[in-house]
């Protein structure tokens, strides 16, 4: 489904963000991409979605190489949910925001409506259809942002810190929403408890390289491995510390 | 601080009004846009010394506000923002045109005072008409109609995005202001020496935000052509409203109704 080969990327200032990454991701996999700040998670996402230009190596989505000529098709196959939903939701109505992607695919208004209704129903948020995005709570905005990507029927969705800045209830709602999605998911996160809950594979990035790649149990329960990458065991696996 | 919060609430309340369910809200957006533009042109085209003829045009905003069930207070609050501009623009008329026009009892009234009043009245009427349009029609619908009448795409998109993000920007200002005040408790506001840095930071954050929004749009297939939902076709009732209102407005403009009504007194 997604194939990354000998990928290297440096920012214009020379900072090497990605170093020789090789990855193969199968259809339907739910992957947690973890690593300390600056490990290269966001840079990798930018390269997959074609926002940043690959310096060296290649990324293929269903055999289609990511490049200038294929960007339109790549963005039909790969959706991305941004960390800050205010970056993503810019229309004055939830409906129009979710319809933005399908309209750009030049679908008829009936088809657009069908896509929007499906996305809203799938996430159980039909009641938010006519609301104004900026009046919604952080958790609601996050789910609307997911719906706006879902409406494009992508084969892969990239999530950038989907549970950051949310209260426990909203966080749980978002986690349940992510769990209900059956397409390929790559979730960049520091929330290792969420990764434990809904992912079946974990990739640790460290200084722009893949430091570890394995099952959730192999990676997230290995305290020694995690500490080498400035990470900790998921909170639910740590001994409670009560003062 | 409360001013920023008030501004955010004011912007939001206008958007909420546009989701109303009255006869005016249900009119076709193009009909509302055309009648509003016609109203603006007719009001502005009035002779600056003909206030009595102009006053008849007060009926349009008053009747529309009643039919659309728009509360007058938030609209008047917004109107107050526009008034100082026309006040200072019209002030020079009073100073430079002191030729006597008429006497109201013992009080002399110059042509300058009349034209000043005319400017203020025109401002009130035109701003009210635009506010009523916004309060009864959502911005994407207005944007679509603006494109339909060939307003440049770049202008329409700028209006729409600015309108959407003004609340996000105000929130940013509010957060930065709070962070500043908490570290300068003795200060009554932002000191002039810090203002440059404050505004500069805000500008940089706005650039970052703009970049992020653009990237998010590109990820959802945006290629420079913004695609709006096509509204339903214009119905008979919409045509009737358009013809009726346009006719009445033109009648009010080219036929001196105030003189006509006065002749019966």
Image (cartoon, coloured by chain):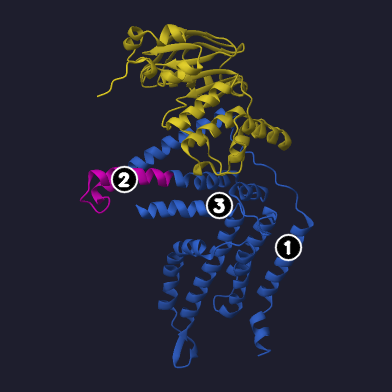
Chain colours: A yellow, B blue
Which residue is at 62% across, 54% downward? B20
Q: Position of residue B172 (x, y in %)?
A: 39, 43
Q: Magenta residues?
A: B169-195
Tag 2–tag 3 contact (CB < 8 Å): no
Q: What distance separates the C-alpha of mark 1 from that of mark 3?
A: 24 Å
Which residue is at 60% across, 50% downward? B138
- Whether B203 is drawn above or below B25: the answer is above
Considering only order in the chain, which callout, 3 or 2, is on the residue closer to the N terminus?
3
Q: What distance separates the C-alpha of mark 2 from that of mark 3?
A: 27 Å
Residue B170 painted magenta: yes
Quickly name the residue at label 2: B178
Q: Position of residue B109 (x, y in %)?
A: 46, 85
Looking at the image, residue B265 sits to the left or right of residue A131; the answer is right
Give a yes or no on whether discs 2 and 3 share a subunit.
yes
Q: Quadrant of the N terminus of chain A?
A: top right
Q: Position of residue A129 (x, y in %)?
A: 61, 40
Quickly name the residue at label 1: B241
């Amino acid at each position: 489904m997604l194939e990354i080969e000998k990928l290297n990327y440096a920012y214009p200032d020379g900072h090497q963000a990605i170093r020789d990454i090789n990855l193969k991701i199968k259809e339907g996999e739910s992957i947690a991409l973890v690593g300390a700040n600056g490990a290269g998670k966001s840079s990798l996402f930018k390269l997959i979605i074609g926002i940043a230009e690959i310096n060296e190596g290649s990324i293929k989505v269903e055999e289609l190489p990511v490049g200038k000529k294929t960007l339109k098709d790549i963005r039909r196959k790969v959706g991305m949910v941004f960390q800050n939903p205010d970056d993503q939701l810019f229309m004055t109505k939830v409906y129009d925001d979710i319809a933005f992607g399908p309209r750009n695919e030049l679908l008829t208004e009936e088809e657009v409506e069908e896509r929007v209704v499906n996305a809203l129903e799938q996430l159980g948020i039909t009641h938010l259809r006519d609301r104004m995005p900026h009046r919604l709570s952080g958790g609601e905005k996050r789910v609307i942002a997911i719906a706006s990507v879902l409406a494009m029927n992508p084969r892969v969705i990239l999530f950038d810190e989907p549970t950051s800045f949310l209260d426990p209830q909203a966080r749980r709602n978002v986690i349940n929403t992510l769990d209900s999605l059956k397409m390929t998911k790559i979730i960049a996160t520091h929330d290792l408890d969420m990764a434990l809950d809904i992912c079946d594979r974990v990739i640790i990035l460290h200084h722009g390289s893949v430091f570890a790649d394995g099952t959730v149990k192999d990676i997230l329960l290995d305290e020694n491995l995690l500490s080498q990458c400035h990470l900790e065991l998921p909170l639910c696996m740590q001994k409670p510390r009560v003062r | 601080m409360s001013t920023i919060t008030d501004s955010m609430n004011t912007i939001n309340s206008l958007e909420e009004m546009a989701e109303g369910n009255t006869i005016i809200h249900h009119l076709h957006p193009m009909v509302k846009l055309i009648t509003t533009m016609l109203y603006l042109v007719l009001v502005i085209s009035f002779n600056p010394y003909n206030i009595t003829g102009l006053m008849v045009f007060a009926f349009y905003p008053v009747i529309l506000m009643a039919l659309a069930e728009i509360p007058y207070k938030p609209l008047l609050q917004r109107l107050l923002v526009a008034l100082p501009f026309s006040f200072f623009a019209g002030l020079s008329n009073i100073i430079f045109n002191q030729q006597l026009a008429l006497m109201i009892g013992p009080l002399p009234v110059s042509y300058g005072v009349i034209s000043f009043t005319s400017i203020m009245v025109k401002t009130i009427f035109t701003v009210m008409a635009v506010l009523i349009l916004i309060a009864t029609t959502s911005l994407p619908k207005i944007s679509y109609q603006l494109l339909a009448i060939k307003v440049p795409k770049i202008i329409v998109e700028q209006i729409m995005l600015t309108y959407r993000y003004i609340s996000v920007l105000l929130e940013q200002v509010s957060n930065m202001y709070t962070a500043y005040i908490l570290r300068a408790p003795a200060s009554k506001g932002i000191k002039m020496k810090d203002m440059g840095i404050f505004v500069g930071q805000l500008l940089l954050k706005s650039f970052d935000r703009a970049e992020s929004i653009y990237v998010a749009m590109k990820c959802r297939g945006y290629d420079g052509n913004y695609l709006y939902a096509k509204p339903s076709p214009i119905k008979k009732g919409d045509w009737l409203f358009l013809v009726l209102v346009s006719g009445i407005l033109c009648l009010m403009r080219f036929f001196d109704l105030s003189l006509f009504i006065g002749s019966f007194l």
